[in-house]
Amino acid sequence: MLENIKENVINLLMEPAYKPMKKDELAQVFVETKEDRQAFFQMLDEMKEAGDLFINSRNKVGSLENFDMKRGIYRATKSRFGFVVTDDSEDDIFIDGDSRKGAFNGDQVLVKITRPAYGKNKAEGVVVKILNRGNQELVGLFHDSKSFGFVIVDDKKFDRDIFIPRTYFSGAKNNDKVVCRITVWPDGDDKKPEGKIVEVLGQKGDRYVEIDSIVRAHGLVEGFNPKVINQVENIPDYVLDEEMVGRTDFRDDLIYTIDGDDSKDFDDAIGVDLLDNGNYKLGVHIADVSHYVIENSPLDREALKRATSVYLVEKVIPMLPKKLSNGICSLNPMVDRLSLSCIMEVEPKNGKVVKYDIVKSVIRSKARLTYHEVSEILENNDSDLMEKYSDFLTSFKHAGDLAQILRKRRFKRGAIDFDFPEAKIELDERGMPVDIVPYERRTSNKMIEEFMLLANETIAEHYYWLKFPFVYRIHEEPDPEKIMSLRNFVQARGYSMRTGRSEVRPGDLQDVLNKIDDKETKQAIGTIMLRSLKQAKYAPSCEGHFGLAAKYYCHFTSPIRRYPDLQIHRIIKENIDGCFNDKRRAHYDSILEAVSNQSSTQERKAVDAERDVDDYYKAVYMEDKLGEKFVGHISSITSFGMFVELDNGIEGLIRLSSLEDMYDYVEKASVLVGQRTGKTFMLGQKVEVELVNVNVDAREIDFEMIEGGN
């Protein structure tokens, strides 16, 4: 009953004509008996605590909008101020250091708008209430001060030390990296939180300890709980005969996997043929992980909690235990595996899918190939590899030709290709970085990419028109103001950029990149362009993918390492089996938004953790190179300096204070102009620098322009 009343209260509060009413007055509208009034008042208080409404000092109840308030997440900076990222707006709210009211980075808060946004200035506000703490456990460095201790948190945005009473040291020693749980939060900005040590990771500086600290700081967990392990132990290591019943049998087809040299889990396989009618037949076969990960089982709940595998330099934190990810779910060569297959017939003239079939299947991959091997065959006709894989050469040829057709079609419709170079960090036997080399996207990498994109689009469009509940991968159109700023920046650099009256097409951005011949300038401008776009995310509504210029898109092809893929596999199989009904529709309608949000959140955590580990290794790699000179290009310019990126992807900061002249920052063009010399520094410009400082703890690298370079 209260749930219905709660919904009705929210609907009333959202009415444009509603004026805040006292709690007693509101009770007269919704309840009749004295007993119900007490329950009603309790419900209002609970809604206030959750931030669903606000009750002011005069006991008047209103929506957040009635009181000029917003709900959002507080994002601290390394300075005292911060921003609140709101639930319903792209615009952040500026929070002065004296107005945060005890909020820390990641906390969910209510903020009252004190000054609305105007022009380019953000709205300003003050934190009124902390709804939920974003970090209950934090990683940091423990210091023993005899009668008490304190933890300096690794996350520099958490700008208070944590006080640790001696009874809560838990065996931690001075300079240990630890996990600390907050037990008492301060009620103001001038006090420290209190906590206790719940785990000692080890001594500061140890490589494994530092990596574990990064992993734990992002809330990632490596091991699996006993319930998950017990469930996995009962899963067989091979496909049973009865499990193949009712599946399309592709075991005799020429199907194979192409992955990286170091890959251990193979969740996609392909087969390509040329039909008698001149069309291509492309089979994309994806591991049927949902056959083993039963919905709402301990294994499934853990998979949703993780939502993604995390790929660090020296290890993987998997979404699923290795017995599944590297074993029965992996499409290993010459063994039977259950799969979901999307078989597409593609017309060669324009790359259009003219016919397709989505089936439950069983396959037997004929080879585990690497990107390097297939690229060497397609690019260089490597004789040894061609002899080794002689049975596959015709299929490789058809696959290469089809991929070119698909790629041409995708760019013709306006997709963007931010082909930024990636770096691979190579470790020695001790686990120390010895080299950082470019990771190439060669012919076979791009080939597999095109096939997976096509399967994802085909699946998404099919289920969109079926009007099934689904999880889509969406990339929303960029904010018009950011596009106007981008256009002004591009024009200031001497390039033209088309935009419509109220929107930009992805092809317009690709046209700009196509006009730039210089590799470094293209990379630098591409980075600025990428920052102007919104982040891709998961959603139960199909809103298109801006970067791919695709109306329909989902993630179907990697269920071993991504939960959204696993989630939609269940829906697809229920449809194939004819058991999707109103009850299942209601079930999926009720969970898919939460699944999408969880998956998007965990994806961002994984990306941040991967970046932090990379930055740690890059700092360690550069630590013994102080005084050495390097050539790089300016990758970013700010009001306090410029970042220079080397060919191996390592980035360092040149501080303005280290330059001989005083420089003005021209934000519109993102350039620095010398006040005395008139010398200009701009994005993409090649410079020669000297390494002057490396801070491994902060993962920071500092360069200085060599003499004569400024």
Image (tube, grey):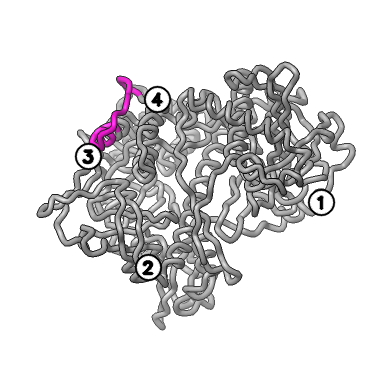
Residue at the disc numbered 1 = 234
Residue at the disc numbered 4 = 505
Left or right side of 331 for 35: left
Nearest to N terminus: mark 2 or mark 4:
4
**Secondary structure at numbered mark 1:** loop
Nearest to N terminus: mark 3 or mark 1:
1
Amino acid type at circle 1 is Asn
**Secondary structure at numbered mark 4:** loop
Nearest to N terminus: mark 2 or mark 1:
1
Left or right side of 191 for 671: left
Asked whether the beta carbons under mark 3 and mark 1 sit within 8 Å of each other, the answer is no
Q: Position of residue 193 (x, y in %)?
A: 38, 64
Asked whether the beta carbons under mark 3 and mark 2 sit within 8 Å of each other, the answer is no
Q: Position of residue 13 (x, y in %)?
A: 38, 27
Nearest to N terminus: mark 3 or mark 4:
4
Q: Position of residue 187 (x, y in %)?
A: 34, 58
Quarter of image, res 53: top left
Cα separation between marks 1 and 4: 51 Å
Q: Which residues are magenta?
A: 487-503
- Residue drawn 38% across the image and 40% down it: 526
Cα separation between marks 2 and 4: 42 Å
Can you tell which of label 3 and label 1 is closer to the viewer? 3
Asked whether the beta carbons under mark 2 and mark 1 sit within 8 Å of each other, the answer is no
* Quarter the C terminus occupies: bottom left
Nearest to N terminus: mark 3 or mark 2:
3
- Residue drawn 58% across the image and 30% down it: 404
Queried whether the magenta region covers residue 435, the answer comes back as: no
Amino acid type at circle 3 is Lys
Which numbered tag is attached to residue 522? none
| Residue in front for this viewpoint, 381 or 589 | 381
* Quarter the N terminus occupies: top right
Residue at the disc numbered 2 = 695
